[in-house]
Image (tube, helix red, strand yellow):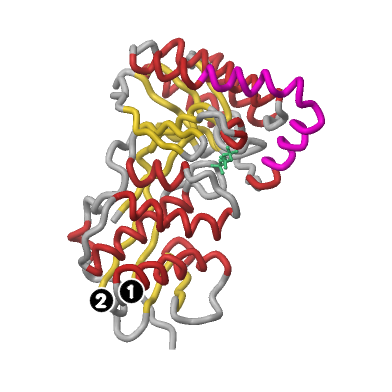
Amino acid sequence: MQAPGKIILFGEHFVVKGKPALALAVKLYAKSTITVGDDKHILYAKDMDAVVDLDSDNIPEKYKPFKKILEIINEEYGSVKPFKAELSSNIPVAAGMGSSAATAVAFTASLLEYLGVEYERGDVSRIAFEAEKITHGRPSGIDNTVSTYGGFIYYKGGAIERIGIEWPGEYVIVAIDTGIPRNTGEVVRDVLDRYDRFPDVMKPIYDSAEVIVEEAITLLRGGRIREVGELMSINHGLLVAIGVSNKAIEEIRYAMLEEGAYGAKLTGAGRGGIVIGLTPSNYVDRIIYKLMNMGYRRTMKLEPDNNGFAPCPNRGLNSGLSIKTPP
Ligand code: PMV
């Protein structure tokens, strides 16, 4: 199974205080392939070259979410026979693209498939959310939802709606990695602290962010992409006001705008991670060229994923896994 990563197009941070956000699943994937095992439940994290025995009581912190998923499935669907699960991903880590949620979704779906039980997409999202709580403490739930269903997801106060918008093919979302990792929890805390110290100043900023999300959906539905870009830049201005931009983000943003992007903003927690720009497809190469010359080596053209989790297209090629089993 594979499950997509995501970007937040509008509304990050404001969503923490109950305002809406709009996110989009993108064609970068976490993959999980499960084959029959000998006598253990073995996880092989290919990118880390790490082999983990999920039955052990003493597993590294970062693999605990997968143990949790196995426990929930054992409890709710019946005992899972021994397996070897291989995980891999091309979603940038700690950059605001939902890599941990996508891995949890892919692993959950592949386990349920392996078990051969009936399940709904909602079950996969719910179980992956439990894993996300172990990873992030108090996640909003948007990441596992977007990765499960794909497409555009509107999220407000825990309620989720899949918005049916066709992405117009002549426009592209470009993503540039600042290369600066950040701690989402820490940035969120700083923003909430600023809110508490200046509530009368911050409240209208949050109200404005809400209007941006609602208007962006109308404009996307109407194919008014130039204005969607403009709203992205306005949304970014609000994110500057709440204190989550930095020099690298601004440098990337201005370069994108100078090369013809309709709009650009940070995505996710900010103070690092990814910057996204919305541009007509004929400007993409020059934007990427410029940013590469400025030293930003990790550049991506993002394409929307409309499927959520799904069988890996090359599934047939993965039959002979070479997973080492620890003694
Ligand atoms: O950078 P990410 O993908 O972890 O996004 C964080 C999004 C916030 O709105 C800042 C926090 C949240 O829980 O929604």
Furthest-left residue in this view: 316
Q: Quadrant of the C terminus?
A: bottom left
Q: What is the three-letter code of the residue carrying label 1?
A: Lys
**Relative to 96, does residue 290 appear above or below in the rendering?**
above
Task: Look at the image and tell me in which quarter the N terminus lies.
Answer: bottom left
Q: Say few, some or many: other residues with alpha carbon within 10 Å of mark 1 (under 14 / 14 to 19 / 20 or more).
A: many
Can residue 168 be seen in the rendering of this structure? yes
Q: Of helix, strand and loop, which one carries label 2?
A: strand
The image shows residue 192 at horizontal and vertical percentages of 72, 37
Q: Is residue 2 above or below residue 216?
A: below
Give the amino acid at mark 2: Val
The residue that disc 1 covers is 84
Residue 212, how many percent across, how many down? 52, 18
Q: Position of residue 223 (x, y in %)?
A: 34, 13
| Residue 202 is inside the magenta segment | yes
In the image, the segment drawn in magenta is 187-212
Left or right for 96, reference 307: right
Q: Left or right of 180: which side holds 161? A: left
Q: Which mark is residue 36?
A: 2
Q: Is residue 303 visible?
A: no
**Residue 271 lies in quadrant:** top right
Tell me, yes or no, whether the two marked residues, 1 and 2, touch with CB atoms within 8 Å. Answer: yes
